Amino acid sequence: MEVEIETLGKAAHGSTPWEGENAIEKALTIYERLRRLPILERRSRHFPRGWVVLGRIEGGYEPMVVPRRCVMHVDIGFAPGVDPKEAERQVREAAEEALSVRVIDLWEGFEVDENSKVVRALAEAFERATGRRPEFSGMPSWTDASNLLRKGLTSVIFGAGRLSVAHSDREALPIPQLLEMTSILRELIDLWPET
């Protein structure tokens, strides 16, 4: 869930902050409430915890002025099984004093049955290519699989690399992992008509 929250305060000279209302501080108070949302407590087999990431915040223009306006963008992750409407309700309640709350993106999480055709085929392809049994895990980030699922297509997230460095200045893919993934996908293509 991606949300933009705007707060409005009252500008004042920095040496008389008591005469103003700091919009950044208001936003940070809301952020702290978001970090305690009940939806974040929900767990599932492959989803150990929810999260809130304050990814961007803009406010103020000069250290000697109490900021009148602040906009923050947060990413909120929650486990499969959480109703997106309930997630939105909790966010809006936590940010009730905000000037505006705009939900930019909201998707329901999902889990794929490990006995589904595509999971079984990929697991077999993995074993054939690597000689190892696959380990199943969850993908805590949004992917295009959500779009496919909405169209009724069972989807599996599979790839090389580490999610923790994706979209960062450290993003990289070790060549051996790329080659191994290629071998696995080749096996999957060969297997697919048989399954």
Image (cartoon, rainbow, N blue to C red):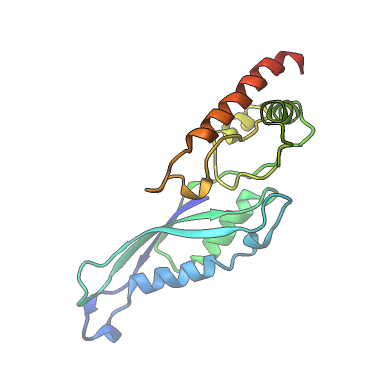
Residue at left offset 47%, top offset 68%: 30
Question: Measuring 39% from the left and 60% from the top, which residue is drawn there?
Answer: 72
Q: Position of residue 128 (x, y in %)?
A: 71, 26
Question: In the image shown, does 47 or 177 lie closer to the viewer?
Answer: 177
Image spot of residue 184 (x, y percent): 63, 26
Q: How many labels sit on residues? A: 0
Give the residue displayed 76% in from the left and 29% down from the top: 120
Residue in the picture at 41% in, 68% down: 27
Q: Is residue 85 left or right of residue 101?
A: right
x, y (%) of residue 46?
69, 49
User: In the rendering, at what x and y percent does residue 177 appear?
Assistant: 54, 35
Q: Residue 137, located in which quarter of the rendered image? A: top right
Extreme residue in the right direction: 115
Give the vertical position of 141 relative to 70 (above or below): above
Question: Which is more toward the observer, 101 or 2?
Answer: 2
Q: Is 37 rendered above or below residue 160?
A: below
- Vertical arrangement, residue 73 with respect to residue 144, above or below: below
> Viewed as shown, does residue 109 lie left or right of 17?
right
In what quadrant of the picture does the C terminus appear?
Answer: top right
Q: Compared with residue 107, is residue 72 higher up or lower down, i.e. above or below?
A: below
Q: Quadrant of residue 122?
A: top right
Residue at the farthest top position: 193
